[in-house]
Image (spheres, rainbow, N blue to C red):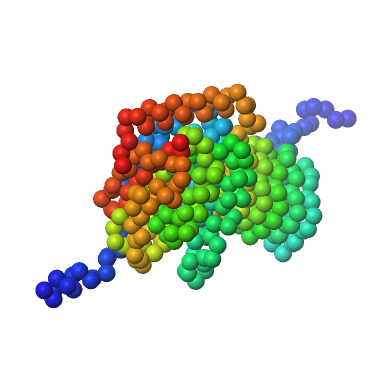
Amino acid sequence: MGVLRALRIAPPSPPPQRSENPSYALKELASDFDIGAEYRKYCHVLDLGASVRENFEFYSKFAAHIQIEELASNLFDATGKPAPDPLGALAGNTAQFCQDKGLDLIVCWDLFNYCTLNQAAELGQILSRHSKPGTRLFTLIGTHSHITARPSLFRITDGLRLVYERTTSEMIKCPKWTKTEVNRFLPGFTRVRSFLLRNGMEEQLFVFE
Amino acid sequence: MWKKSDFPENIDKNPGNSVLPISTPPPIDTAPKSAAPVERAATADKAIIGPSISVKGEISGAEDILIQGTVDGTLNLKQNIVTVGKSGRVSANVYGRIIHVEGEVTGDCFGTEQVVVHKSGTVKGNITAPRVSLEDGARLKGTIDTSSVPDTAAEGKFEAKQTSKRDANGSTSVAQ
């Protein structure tokens, strides 16, 4: 009994620093945006993650307007504590970026897992405001009890697989947002696909109606 | 009186195009391979703002430039190559034909041909150029625009196609 209890309360071991996983959502997106070079220059992509060469190359195949927001670095201050106003600049930057055209693709990566309830709702409001019918949104929602303490860095490979690069081995509790909660965060969006991966992340694809 | 036959055969008439005699082996470079000579050769024909130089205002001209110092204002060299070196810090909008960022740029970059953000480079601002390349490790916070002026008619077509794809997906494969 004692052994069982000890096993149950043992802290989860951190995932490997770098792992490559299949991404069904990316394959969907690649298929959705296979619309020919003619339309490339009208397509607007918002990536809330860090600037990564491979991801930029992936977006460049179908979009000529790409905004990289590096929101992960805004969520925490220099000491590692949650930053007071991480979304302050996002609304203005995005409005300036897409003007009245609206976004075509929003890539949130795992950022919802690191937002408080209020931040997630605010982020969803900003994204909805700059969406239009047909806007795709891709996010990764944690389903395990713990996640790494900082957002991971994601790299899209040529074969449309996703490389996860952990930036820390420290683990924190995962909010484990339910689908209903995520739906509430993203007003106007409808989930069209979700893929649960072995690493505990659920890829979710939304379309703005 | 000078005659054509007096002209020594081994002297090339074009000093910039001298040719070694065939019997002479090519010079062997015994110096250690370092970046310094290459960098010196590469920078020989461009203006350089050294690491200890700080400029406030507009820089314009018609030759390539390498910035290793600090520039605060505007860089306007639309026909030339602008390189922000590793120690360069630029708080300005940068206009160039080709822009290389190895240091830090806070401002917008407008390249008429290309903008390259190298692995040591950071751009906090927007990049507009027909070709943009980010090296692995390059940091960018802002937008990238590789298009020309949009055509409204074609844009309408794009949205229609997106919507039709969405309908097809939504009706057959909703997975909650």
Front residue of B49/B94: it is B94
Q: Is residue A62 left or right of residue B42?
A: left
* Number of marks present in the image shown: 0
Image height check: is A133 above or below A114? above
Image height check: is B150 above or below B83? above
Residue at the image point whose x is 55% and y is 36% from the top:
A64
Residue at the image point whose x is 30% and y is 55% from the top:
A143
Residue B152, quarter of picture: top right
Residue at the image point whose x is 49% and y is 61% from the top:
A75
x, y percent for residue B79: 73, 38
Residue at the image point whose x is 46% and y is 29% from the top:
B163
Residue B67, quarter of picture: bottom right
Front residue of A42/B132: it is A42
Q: Is residue A129 left or right of residue A20?
A: right
Residue B35 seen from this side: no
x, y percent for residue A7: 18, 70
Residue at the right extreme, as displayed: B1
x, y percent for residue A6: 18, 73
Q: Is residue A1 left or right of residue A131?
A: left
x, y percent for residue B90: 68, 56
Q: Is residue A39 left or right of residue A22?
A: right
Residue B93 seen from this side: yes
Q: Which quarter of the rendered picture does the N terminus of chain A lie within?
A: bottom left
Image height check: is B96 above or below A11? above
Residue at the left extreme, as displayed: A1
